[in-house]
Image (cartoon, rainbow, N blue to C red):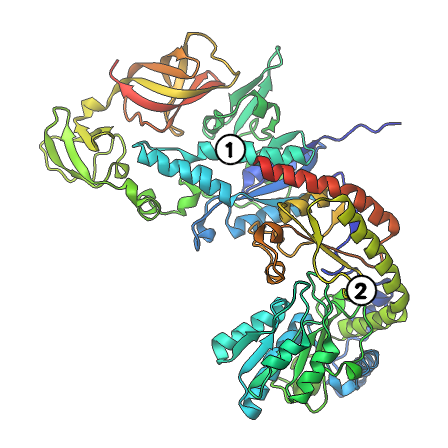
Amino acid sequence: MVWQERVYLDYAATTPVDERVIKAILPYFSPNFGNPSSVHFEGQQAEAALEEARERIAQALGAKPREIIFTSGGTESDNLAVRGLALAERKRRGATRILITPVEHHAVSATAHQLEDVYGFKVEYIPVDSHGQVDPDDLRALINADTALVSVIYANNEIGTINPIAEIAKICCEKNVPFHTDAVQAVAHLSLDVESLGVTALSLGAHKFYGPKGVGALYLRRGTSIVPTQTGGAQENGLRAGTENIPLIVGMAEALSLVLEDLDRESERLRTLRDRLIEGVLESIPRARLTGHPTQRLPNHASFAFEHVDANLLLMHLDHEGFACSSGSACKTGNPEPSEVLQAIGLTPQWAMGGLRVTLGRGTSQDHIERFLEVLPQVVEKCRVINRVS
Amino acid sequence: METPRIRKVVVAMSGGVDSSVAAALLVEQGYDVVGMMLRLWSEPGKEDLNRCCTPDAMMMARRVAAKLGIPFYVIDVREKFREWVVGAFIQGYMAGMTPNPCLVCNRRIRWGVLLQQALSLGAEWLATGHYARIIQDERGQFLLLRGLDTSKDQSYVLSVLGQEELRHTLLPIGEFTKPQVRDLARKFGLPVAERSESQDLCFLAGEDYRDFLMRHAPEVIRPGLIVNRRGEVLGEHKGLAFYTIGQRKGLGIATSQPLYVVDKDIRQNLLVVGPQEDLGKRVLHAAPVNWILGEPPAEQFRAQVKIRYTASPLDATVVVETPQQVRVEFDQPVRDITPGQRAVFYQDDIVLGGSMIISTSMR
């Protein structure tokens, strides 16, 4: 295969694992393979590693170690929070309404819909504006004593918009309703402090911040009632049964520390590149628009919609030119539907089929962005021509 | 120093052994290969049964591409397939014909949309896993030939192509036999998925075409009368689309001698039946014609003519009435010539052209 030098611009999908993280992980496959529940020395070594990781992650989030539950990733964290909190609140005080937004990750929205279909909850939507952002006043109008749970995504994966999490949390706190946020996309780029945010629960997944896939965590405020969704042994304070994945947990803790070490400088660097990218795209491509909030968005995240462009075709041509990007409506099996998120922010199908997400990260350079800006206008034009003639 | 440009080819992959080996051969020959698979239309809920692109087949194609280290993309053509291919299928039946939608798919989807996608990606060719061959003659024209494995030959379904398409087409397995292709798959270490070799239409998902028509084009189903050549009424039919030329069973009329469907009178909605002798026809009329070289070889010429994908070639004289209309005179009467199917003209291994059968006559 003749493959040009690849330019990876899909850091919101996943990130490469940091070399230092790999180095931290390896000893915990062997020789330090112990089960932290065991009494013997090997078990003690594993338990020490587990608890050290917990402490590091708690510290990074401004939480207490007991408030960190390790999971298999962001999706499991979302499942545990949404299902576990909703069931606990119904048991505790009979509440049956779940409030989410139309721009949640499927890990939250599909879980909420299952709670509606199978468990008799009622899912209601807090509206979002044309940037995909929640207005806290809308929540204030919707929340009541029957609300079991509010879940609002911290920063949207598809359009990058950041929600006013602290304000939302304040409203929920006043009403004594637990508030969960999916912060999976935010962790690598925003400094998170659960105390000042005031959230009840917060999900994260390691592979979005240069850690391994298959591991994540849920922050759960101490004293919160929750029903475990995975039952069995007493691991994770009885909230998540199953032998802990020590190597990956150690890797996640290492990755998070490394990301936070450099967060401000790296975010600033990425923001500059992102702004150059957005400016370049909107200048050089007709019938193009930025999706999501112009300023209150993830520093590494640029997303666009192009009228009369088939996103799958666009991604194929970009891939062929050496650029790995993504789209909300992209689908590997060739049955694209217009993106739900883009429709939720008011885009018509002829725009919503043409979403492009470009997300930057550690490997992204100014040169990559300039090269991308040279290629993209031609590729968009090519897709429009194909759209017209076929 | 300039490095020689490596030439790009898009291979249409299905997850089956033929197109997988085609892709592997091209990689081995040093081309810059890109895999593509078409997502065709299925009735909602029947995606798993579509013969051409089930999720399993797609996964298999993806695995083969990954194994070969080539990029792979799925091209969504569901809307176009529904409009052009399924549309032509329904219209054919409405006109009283027995259409072959695969030919429409080849012409408009594979060598239409997919070839265009390939060219737009900078490829010079579209390659497929058909058992047929393309050679260039001394004048630079592209000739379409039967595959070397005559038992698997698929040149019939490629008789819709012209010079412009053939110029941009590679058929890597046309030089091999099916057993050789299977051996190659093993040699390349490809996951070998044997796809069913049934000739059923992909979008029927194993179902009888009549049930499909009832759901999607109930207006096609108009009951009428069954008559013999003399116009005597022998019974009632359920709709002309339910019957094919040469059909004997299921007519629901009791007679002393077996009767066969020999004709359909679309205008009067009559199903014409007769004894076996009435089935033999010497002449067929066909239009429009696709000449592989762009024009007919002569005003009239001898050829071997296939009247169906699975039929044997039969000796005939092809008379070119206009470049877009031919009369084919068979040496012997031929059974079951079916309007809507394609007549394809061969001289030995060479495909000269093909055309849709419009009607038949005794002379």
Three-letter residue code for mark 2: Tyr
Asked if residue A131 is positioned above or below residue A372 in the image, the reply reads below
Q: Nearer the viewer, mark 1 or mark 2?
A: 1
Residue found at the far top of this picture: B299
Q: Residue at x 30, y 22 (%)?
A: B359
- Residue on which the image places disc 2: A210
Which chain does the residue under circle 1 lie in? B
Alpha carbon of mark 1 to alpha carbon of mark 2: how far? 46 Å
Q: Position of residue A130 (x, y in %)?
A: 66, 63
Of A261 and A171, nearer the camera is: A171
Q: Position of residue A22 (x, y in %)?
A: 83, 65
- Residue on which the image places disc 1: B108
Of A272 and A205, nearer the camera is: A272
Three-letter residue code for mark 1: Arg
Q: Position of residue A238 (x, y in %)?
A: 66, 87
Residue B151 in view? yes
